[in-house]
Amino acid sequence: MKTHKYTVIIIFSIFLLIKGGIVIKKSVLEGKKFIFHLPNVESDTDISAVEWKLADRNKLLAHISLDNANKTIRFWEESRFQFMQNGSMIIRDVKQEDTGNYTCKIIFQNNTIEIYIISLTLYSVDQGLYIVLIPVTGGFLLLGSVIVILLKCRRKSSTLDEPIYMNTNRKCDRNPQTRK
């Protein structure tokens, strides 16, 4: 009877100590770069390998071997995804399709496994405010510039020698004190 290689892996993984299952919620602005650092892991611990998986689609993204070979096996070729030598993952130009739950499985050299679930959500700047704010501000600027132009034109048309009232002679006739 031939033993399948996956059977050996499954039996071996049953005896490993598994810690984790912690859900970490992260939020990123649409179109920005986002870095998934290895959660709660000191840099000088003995990590054997790191696996990144997109849990919602059950898709293995990469297996990063950190012990001696320090090699990365990518299972999903996407130019916006980059896997670092320390096990971190970078997503450039985050889009709506990148949201979901990512599983980070950290395998230590003492055969313990820590599993972290990172829930990535996307937010964008609310443009409803800008849709109202920009036309209103533009209207106030236009109104203010029209008022300034009218006041300057009115000031230019009047001279200092010209009296405010055009009918000054009539006022002088009624009031004898103002006559010269």
Image (cartoon, grey):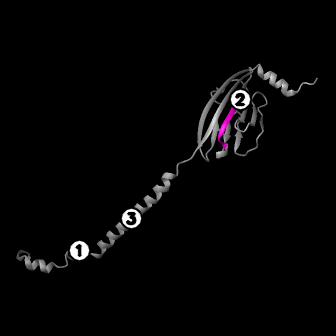
The image position of residue 120, as x and y in percent, is 63, 38
Instruction: State the residue lying farthest toward the right.
Output: 1
Q: Residue at x 7, y 76 (%)?
A: 175
Residue located beneath label 3 in the image: 143
- The three-letter amino acid code for the residue at tag 3 is Leu
Q: State the CA–CA distance, disc 1 to disc 3.
A: 28 Å
Q: Amino acid at mark 2?
A: Lys
Residue at image position (82%, 25%) is 9
- Compared to residue 30, the image places residue 48 above or below, namely above
126 left or right, relative to 148: right
Is the magenta region chiefly helix, strand or loop? strand
Is 53 included in the stretch rendered in magenta?
A: no
Residue 127, image x and y in percent? Answer: 52, 52
Quadrant where the C terminus sits is: bottom left
In front of the other: label 2 or label 1?
A: 2
Front residue (pair 96, 145): 96
Q: Within the magenta stretch, is there residue 101?
A: yes
Marks 2 and 1 sit apart, C-alpha to C-alpha, by 85 Å
Q: Residues within 10 Å of mark 3 (few under 14, many from 20)?
A: few
Where does the image place residue 43, in percent across and percent down from the top left? Answer: 66, 27
The answer to whether residue 159 of the structure is visible from this angle is yes
Q: Quadrant of the N terminus?
A: top right
Pointer 1: what residue?
A: 160
Residue under the image location 73 percent in, 45 percent down: 78
Q: Is residue 160 left or right of residue 90?
A: left
Q: Which residue is mark 2?
A: 105
Magenta residues, start to end? 98-105
